[in-house]
Structures are given as structure tokens and as C-alpha cells.
Amino acid sequence: MIITAGDFEGFIAAFVNNLVQLLILAAALLSVSGLLHAFKFTEGDTLVDLPLLELLNGGFEGDWAALFPAWRFALAYLLVAVILLGARWFAHPVSGNV
């Protein structure tokens, strides 16, 4: 079996697409956990807001939206992952030089 340049380019494109999807899903998990995009502004400093950690320590009081302060960012990351997943079926390769 001979692997052509087109086959190799297709493999690289699929690999990069999968890698980007995994990185975006990792960013969504970090956002929902509060490790990314979740800050609490205090009078003298900016702190990372980790309500899940406070919940484990028994010091959390609030609703589910306060439990996941960066849920909007996680939702946006998931939307981008879905768009990239859909690109496999809706994008068509361009032949020749553009």
C-alpha cells in the first residue's frame, strides 16, 4: 500500500482537528471546575474562586450557578467543540492552490 501526499495531509488534518477538540474539552473541564476563568475580586487582591473546594470543606453556601462560577465559559468551549465536530461533515477539501 502506497501512502500518497494527499493521504498524509488528510491524516495530519484529522489529527490536528482531534487534538484541538481535546484541548477545547479540557478547557471546558477546567472552566467548570473553577480553575480557569473563575476569579473573585476582593478589595486588595484578585483570587481564584474555587467553590467546589469550599463545598468539600463544608464552607459553601449558594446555588448551583455560584458553585460553577465560570459555567458560561465552559458552555462556550463546548459549543466550539461541537462546531469543530460538525466541521468534519460540513467542510469540503479545496483542491488546488487557492
Image (spheres, helix red, strand yellow):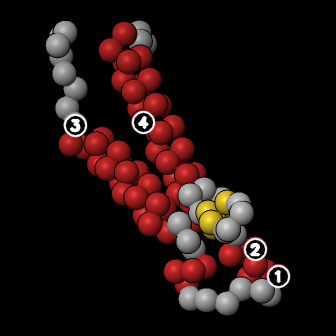
Nearest to the eye among marks 4 and 2: give it.
2
For the residue labelled by badge 2, is the local secondary structure a helix, a strand or a loop?
helix
Write down the residue under mark 2: 53
Secondary element at image label 1:
helix
In x, y percent, where is residue 59?
78, 86
Instruction: Give the CA separation, mark 4 to mark 1.
Output: 39 Å
**Three-letter amino acid code at disc 2?**
Leu
Quadrant containing the C terminus in the rendered view: top left
Identify the amino acid type marked 1. Asn
* Mark positioned earlier in the residue sequence (4 or 1): 4
The disc at residue 57 is 1
Q: Which residue is mark 3?
A: 91
Between the residue at mark 4 and the residue at mark 2, the CA separation in whole angstroms equals 33 Å
- Taking depth in this image into account, of 6 and 51 the one nearest to the observer is 51
Whether the residues at callouts 4 and 1 have beta carbons within 8 Å, the answer is no
Given contact means CB atoms under 8 Å apart, are the residues at marks 2 and 1 in contact? Answer: yes
